[in-house]
Amino acid sequence: MYWTKYIAACALTLILRTSAPGARAQSAQTTSNDLENWWKNAVLYEIYPRSFQDSNGDGIGDLNGITQRLDYLKTLGVDAIWLSPIYPSPQVDFGYDISDYENIDPQYGTLADFDRLVTEAKQRNIRIIMDMVMNHTSDKHKWFIESRSSKDNPYRDWYVWHDGKGQTGKSQGEPPNNWQSDFGHSAWEWDPMTRQYWYHKFYIQQPDLNWNNPKVHEAFKDILKFWLDRGVAGFRFDAITTLFEDPQMRDDEVLKDKNGNSYKNAYGDVALNDTMTNNLPGVHPVMQEMRALADQYKPDVFPGTRIFIGETYLPNIAELAKQYGTPDHPEFHLPMDTQVGFINKLDVAAFREKLNDVETKIDGNIPLLVFDNHDNPRLDARYGDSLRNDDIQRVISTILFTSRAASLFYYGDEIGMKTTPPVRKEDVKDPVGLTGWPTDKGRDGERTPMQWDATTNAGFGNGTPWLPVPSTYTTVNVTAEESDPHSLLAWYESLIQLKKNNPVLAGGAQVMLDNENPKVLSWMRQAPGAAPIVVSVNFTAEAQTVNLTGGSAGLKAGPVRTLFKSPGGSDPASLDHLDLGAFGVYIGQVQ
């Protein structure tokens, strides 16, 4: 209902393909081409299951809770849900330390609950994407228990083991090299029983798998097939660029300032680059192998392309382009472009450059834009100014949903949930915060329970939530925003429907406009046989006027029809004079 109210309030002229008010794009008749290409303009929604909805009162979100909220996600316009790990786990890293890849952790439910979620989601044309962790397992996984039992165990070379530097019969020596864990200190842990070190890119309890072992490849093919058989729509591959390490075991380079002094990281360690343990070329043939499996797999639970999403924090656009593979040897459908979403400041020139890169330098592939997730502070902490956070989020979400890209966002973004870190170390749950306190307070602040309403625990559940509900829940919640046509939730839903229903925004090319403007970011979307659409977003707290004519795009002064705009924004008479309020947004179709 708030979608219809928002159109009326803002005088939108968006025309939906279907005649029913608030009708959804996914309700249109599905064709085989739709099934093949559904991901190319998809709206993807990350759920951190512990924090979304608790159905049984134990304080932890679960699969049945997600199922209860599927109608909300359908109304929002979500095409697919990415679930962070729900496998059995000791929960050292809240599920990213997996002890069994082919089951569900009891705190989240059962395989039957998972199957029900897939079935119920399918009825709403929502797909389920699993998180796949191939870099490491839990130290409680049966493979590692075997591997650690003796040097001649058949599973020994499933993991990365090495003698210490200077090791003797009596001394363990030093770690094999200076490699560091991403969560602090040495990446090597001594095993006194078998007298070797094991390698862990992340926590000590997350030993890295040895991807030089063909048996590891075959094991993960079986794991992918297990979940494909249950109807998943694809996988998000965690930490995928870290599968391989330098075979020569060379030290990483120490990072130094211009005076030659080494930096320290948040854990008090000497800061290193990680070129010996990240983004090594062996990752590409592994992903080609896994993609070949998924591409030939034709389960009938939910027909259509099974997609591969990559967690790809990379140094430049050329490295991102490699993650797509080639037409003959494809890898990821959608490697995450973190170079746009994690600029972490409202810098027009930087956004213009990074957006232009991903639209022109990835060989015509589809970008995946993402601005936050369970590992990073929310948008308010990275882009907000504490005064106009919601208006700034309108700017960010406009970039997310009106660029030529698939769009991924994090639960609670749509209502403006804020980063709420713990104030005392004794309240910290995330091991990152326990290790890095107080410099790094960890990731609890972006993982707080979803704020559904103003009742006790924000409607998350009857039990005491595993993390405290932020005090903002009384006003920042789904129920309150559903009834407000000017809310951030209404804004998100409107933008998503515009993205999915307007053919120019759904598939048109993208060209940057007004390229010298330091305060307003503007671009044009264009498709054959349709009038171009222009988008302008003001990155400042002061009103701005822009002229979108001239330049290489060849736009001329003339009328433009408003499709969407910030509340209170004006309708321009011509493309050569667009007035934008503070952090204002304008979307219009050239006449």
Image (spheres, helix red, strand yellow):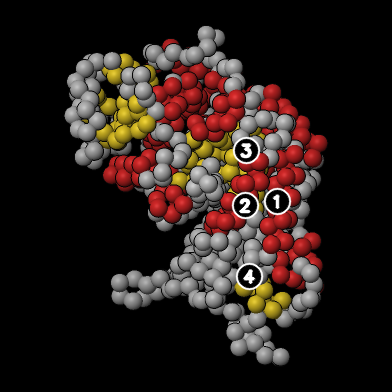
Report helix, strand or loop for mark 3: loop
In this rendering, would 50 be left or right of 560? right
In the image, what residue type sits under mark 1?
Lys
Q: Report, in whole angstroms, how far the alpha carbon at label 1 lies from the one at label 3.
A: 14 Å
Residue highlighted by disc 1: 221
In the image, what residue type sits under mark 2?
Glu
Report helix, strand or loop for mark 1: helix
If you read the primary sequence from the N terminus, does the residue marked by circle 4 or circle 2 appear first? 4
Quadrant of the image containing the C terminus: top left
Q: Quadrant of residue 437?
A: bottom right
If you read the primary sequence from the N terminus, does the residue marked by circle 4 or circle 1 appear first? 4
Task: Check residue 306 in the rendering and tell me which mark sits there, or answer none.
Answer: 3
Report helix, strand or loop for mark 2: helix
Report helix, strand or loop for mark 4: strand
If you read the primary sequence from the N terminus, does the residue marked by circle 2 or circle 1 appear first? 1
Residue highlighted by disc 4: 199
Q: Report, in whole angstroms, how far the alpha carbon at label 3 lies from the one at label 2.
A: 14 Å
Quadrant of the image containing the N terminus: top right
Residue 310 visible at all: no
Is 533 located above or below residue 170 in the figure?
A: above
Is 69 located above or below residue 337 in the figure?
A: above
Are circles 2 and 1 on residues that touch, CB within 8 Å? yes
